[in-house]
Amino acid sequence: MDRLSELPPFIIHHIMSRLSAKEAAQTSILSKRWKFSSGSILIDMVECPNMMVLELSRVPLTEHEFRVLISNFPLLEDLSVNLCDLLKRITISSNLLKNLSICFCNNLKAIDIDAPNLLSFCYCNNPIPVSSMNAPCPLEVQLVTGEVDLDTQWYIKMKEFLAESNQIEYVFLTLMSKKKNSFNFDECRESLSSFPRVIGNLYVSICEPSVHYTVLLDGLLEVCYPRTLSVLIDKDTSFIEWLYEKLRNVDASCCDTLDIKCWWHYLKDFKIEGFLRSHPEDQKPLCLENLKDALHQYRIRTVQFHLHWCFPEFYK
């Protein structure tokens, strides 16, 4: 009879924590359960005050437990928090932290980051949070909408989130929702009349071709003004073709009476380039003088629109 497998987990972990790596591996002979225990030995983290790199993955921490844990590592420089679904708020205050990554924390509602020497910050596939950030580094954001309703409130939350950062290098949006895109420009301006944040690159991948293109574009360009708008092509090229014609025929007569106008009024010119599907990172972009012909002639993976904006004096 395998009586060793009947021991409580904390006793198994305590025993194995005192073994060498070789001895821990050999315990799989003694018990079927021990075979899978050697990869989850408990470590007294408080005894590691000089730790500089920490990755938390699938760790069931509450907000308080996370804050207490992080406070034990005053020299921490690299922190990665992944798949920690109990976390609803992340609070970090550190003068030494250099690199921060928060990914796939599905119940996250708020982040409070005070890291004045942060060099990189990646916020990947979490809900849009209420945020407060003192972090002067470039911010990289990746969001997959899932079945979220892309209504005006979604765009307002996104705009408020991006407004917290002074340097936004990349925003990646994968639009998968089949729900109606119901952005309303007037409603958005009544709730949040601030100027959209200028960002480096906005990448958009549309997985649901039935999305309302005009509403989508107005919503995205009320959230931010990208210097480069990149659209990833799967099979359907209709959005690319529509966007190209839309940018060529801008009508800037819609909101002349407003102090902060819609994006049409500030877009002065654009240039279009394309990347092939094979190894796009290793190739030079193709100049697409005639987009429709190029889409049929080449196997294009990504189309980039380099947008040239001209903003009013009060924004500069």
Image (tube, grey):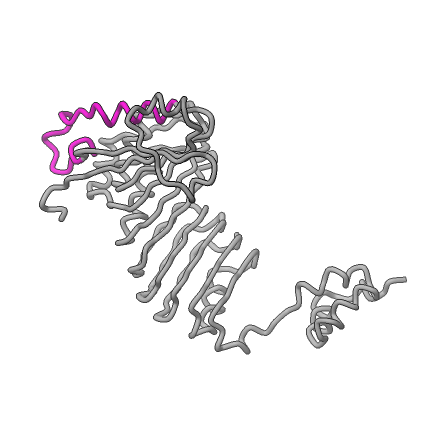
Above or below, 243 against 108 in this view is above
Above or below, 30 against 106 in this view is below
Is 245 left or right of 180, judged from the image as shown?
left
At 35% across and 50% down in the image, what residue appears? 130
Q: Position of residue 3 (x, y in %)?
A: 85, 65
Which image quadrant for residue 16? bottom right
Q: Residue at the right extreme?
A: 1
Q: Nearer the viewer, residue 26 or 87?
A: 26
Numbered range of the magenta stretch:
238-266
Above or below, 26 against 247 in this view is below
If the image is split into quadrants, where does the N terminus sit? bottom right
Q: Position of residue 113 (x, y in %)?
A: 35, 60
Q: Position of residue 65 (x, y in %)?
A: 50, 65
At 50% across and 60% down in the image, what residue appears? 62
Q: How many marks?
A: 0
Q: Position of residue 228 (x, y in %)?
A: 29, 40
At 49% across and 48% down in the image, what residue appears? 106
Q: Nearer the viewer, residue 248 or 170?
A: 248
At 79% across and 64% down in the image, what residue appears? 28
Is-magenta flag for residue 46? no
Q: Nearer the viewer, residue 298 or 21?
A: 298
Is 256 left or right of 41, judged from the image as shown?
left
Q: Nearer the viewer, residue 37 or 228?
A: 228
